Image (cartoon, coloured by chain):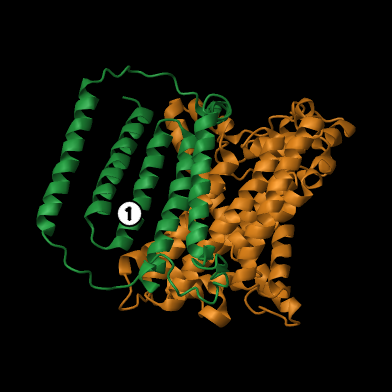
Chain colours: A green, B orange
């Protein structure tokens, strides 16, 4: 065994442990802030695995998108609404936990079965290393153009939805006169718009 | 540009020479490589730290000059040892963790702020082969790594259990996310012209005709966008809202003392030097001399590949990089002590409503010019 391959194995074991332990922590720890930070650690571990597979561009994109954007936004949302309030006790919590653990365990067994029954071709196709960036670009602008654009439309929809929810200036028209009402909503920003207003009339 | 690019010599390759020497002593190539690995890392780390010491001294001296004071005077000649004294003071200070703080996250936060910044020095070139690793994703690695930093800021802001800290952390994250996008767009325009993400290729592409071919002439708008965004990412005035003293005590740093505070301090200054280095790499021709060094060598009738000439050009490259960098650091310090702070809404307006559209238009123009004039814009 050469030095480089043993280094690779040690790195793989460490990264795998980070991902598994971190992911378990995300699910099992009660403190939601800790869960969010651990999620960032899991994303970093996955990025490390990509790096180990010679996919440096994917690894950097993983860090940029998942750690730098998704995880930061999750943390941002958690910290903005960080109220330490006692939640109502949920009925039959124990049974729910056991049920969800059963479903997750079943999924894990299913994945193991797929893993064991699939014939993996080893070694796989040779890694193209530094050329990967160009290859990804070519794919994104040829055969994966439609999925790529659809994903961006999805993001646009999410963005518009967020803006509508945050700005609260939905054009509500008066039922009787048909005029536009409630447009000056910066002053009324404390008034929730997503409540049932049918019994007001 | 590609024709001119081939003229650029390979320059010094210390790694190759080191490995050859060690293999001459009978080490295997693998062992030689492992022995080589820590050397450039330690060198760059100490270079970064010395860069910080110099910057801190400059900051003190220039701020003093801007306010018509003398500044540090007694610690060494011209107060040159003052940053050392500052560091020593922070080193021996008591390390306080507030009683109601989350001690684990409180300790981890500053580390998470500092480590990505230091890691980004991986891609900073001081010469053709004078960088830790010429990886293919180059500048993209820096953008990815700098996006980790807000997590550390949020972490320390949250763990301090102090409303000012939390607000500072949230502001830092919001600011960093907003300015990352125009920053990446400005970098993308440069990458588009050099057809590569690698920092070495970006510099080589600029050094065909000396200072005339520097990217600043082809990307003036991109240069301004990048500089503004870099200042915002470093949280320097006029964008130092996360630690605005008058509003937030000291933002996320409020509860920190001793070495943990020193980590934040170090992180912000290393980030400033790194940003200046990257501006010089992306827009000011990196290690390139204003007149192509090959021409100078030809005038004096020297062979560019001769060992002594190589050592000379290598040193000149390092000097040029540092000179350009500190010119930009000087500009940043001058900006810090002469401009007022913007409000948070002005900051976000500038990022989203001004820099982002301008960055997009700049990218579109660069793409159009690249198609129209492939010779000048790296076809």
Q: Residue at x 50, y 68 (%)?
A: A176
Q: Is residue B48 left or right of residue A56?
A: right
Left or right: where B17 falls relative to B27 = right
At a point 71% along the width and 52% down the height, the residue shown is B358
The answer to which of B168 and B274 lies nearer the viewer is: B168
Q: Position of residue B192 (x, y in %)?
A: 68, 36
**Residue of label 1:** A38
- B369 or A8: nearer the viewer: B369
Name above or below for residue B266 compared with residue A133: below
Q: Provide residue A54's location: percent of width, then percent of height.
A: 44, 30
Mark 1 packing: few (<14 Cα in 10 Å), some, or many (20+)? many
Q: Is residue A47 above or below residue B330?
A: above
Q: Is residue B318 above or below residue A86?
A: above
**A81 or B103, which lies in front?**
A81
Q: Is residue B369 left or right of residue A8?
A: right
Q: Position of residue B270 (x, y in %)?
A: 57, 59
The residue at the point 64 percent across, 34 percent down is B196
The answer to whether residue B195 of the structure is visible from this angle is yes
* A141 over B146 or under it: above or below: above
Can residue B312 be seen in the rendering of this structure? no
């Amino acid at each position: 065994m050469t030095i480089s391959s043993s280094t690779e194995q040690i790195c793989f074991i460490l990264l795998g442990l980070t991902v598994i332990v971190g992911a378990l922590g995300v699910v099992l720890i009660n403190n939601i802030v800790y869960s969010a930070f651990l999620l960032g650690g899991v994303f970093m571990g996955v990025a490390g695995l990509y790096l180990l597979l010679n996919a440096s561009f994917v690894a950097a994109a993983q860090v940029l998108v998942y750690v730098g954007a998704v995880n930061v936004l999750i943390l941002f949302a958690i910290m903005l609404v960080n109220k330490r309030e006692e939640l109502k006790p949920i009925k039959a919590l124990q049974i729910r936990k056991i049920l969800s653990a059963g479903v997750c365990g079943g999924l894990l067994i299913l994945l193991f079965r797929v893993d064991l029954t699939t014939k993996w071709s080893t070694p796989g196709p040779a890694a193209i290393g530094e050329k990967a960036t160009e290859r990804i670009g070519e794919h994104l602008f040829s055969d994966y153009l439609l999925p790529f654009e659809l994903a961006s439309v999805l993001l646009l929809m999410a963005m518009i939805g967020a803006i509508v929810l945050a700005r609260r200036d939905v054009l509500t028209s008066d039922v009787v006169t048909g005029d536009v009402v409630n447009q000056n909503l910066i002053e009324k920003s404390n008034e929730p718009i997503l409540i049932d207003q049918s019994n007001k009339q | 540009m590609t024709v001119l690019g081939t003229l650029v010599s390979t320059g010094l390759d210390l790694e190759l020479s080191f490995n050859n020497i060690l293999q001459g002593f009978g080490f295997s190539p693998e062992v030689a490589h492992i022995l080589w690995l820590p050397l450039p890392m330690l060198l760059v780390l100490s270079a970064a730290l010395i860069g910080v010491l110099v910057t801190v001294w400059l900051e003190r001296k220039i701020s003093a000059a801007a306010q018509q004071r003398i500044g540090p005077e007694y610690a060494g000649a011209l107060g040159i040892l003052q940053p050392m004294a500052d560091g020593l003071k922070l080193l021996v200070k008591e390390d306080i963790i507030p009683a109601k703080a989350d001690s684990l996250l409180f300790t981890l936060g500053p580390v998470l702020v500092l480590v990505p910044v230091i890691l980004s020095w991986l891609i900073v070139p001081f010469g053709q082969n004078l960088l830790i690793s010429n990886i293919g994703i180059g500048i993209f690695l820096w953008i990815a790594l700098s996006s980790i930093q807000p997590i550390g800021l949020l972490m320390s802001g949250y763990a301090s259990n102090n409303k000012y800290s939390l607000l500072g952390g949230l502001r830092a994250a919001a600011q960093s996310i907003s300015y990352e996008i125009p920053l990446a767009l400005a970098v993308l325009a440069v990458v588009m012209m050099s057809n590569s993400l690698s920092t070495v290729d970006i510099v080589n592409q600029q050094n065909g005709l000396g200072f005339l071919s520097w990217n600043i002439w082809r990307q003036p708008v991109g240069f301004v966008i990048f500089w503004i965004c870099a200042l915002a990412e470093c949280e320097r005035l006029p964008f130092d809202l996360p630690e605005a003293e008058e509003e937030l005590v000291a933002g996320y740093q409020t509860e920190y003392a001793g070495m943990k505070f020193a980590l934040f301090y170090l992180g912000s200054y290393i980030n400033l030097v790194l940003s200046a280095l990257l501006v010089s790499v992306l827009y000011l021709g990196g290690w390139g001399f204003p007149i192509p060094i090959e021409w100078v060598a030809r005038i004096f009738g020297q062979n560019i590949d001769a060992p002594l000439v190589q050592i000379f050009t290598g040193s000149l490259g390092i000097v040029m990089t540092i000179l350009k960098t500190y010119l930009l650091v000087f500009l940043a310090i001058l900006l810090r002590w002469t401009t007022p702070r913007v409000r948070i809404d002005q900051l976000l307006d500038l990022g989203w409503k001004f820099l982002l559209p301008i960055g997009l238009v700049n990218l579109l123009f660069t793409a159009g010019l690249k198609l129209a004039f492939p010779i000048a814009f790296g076809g």
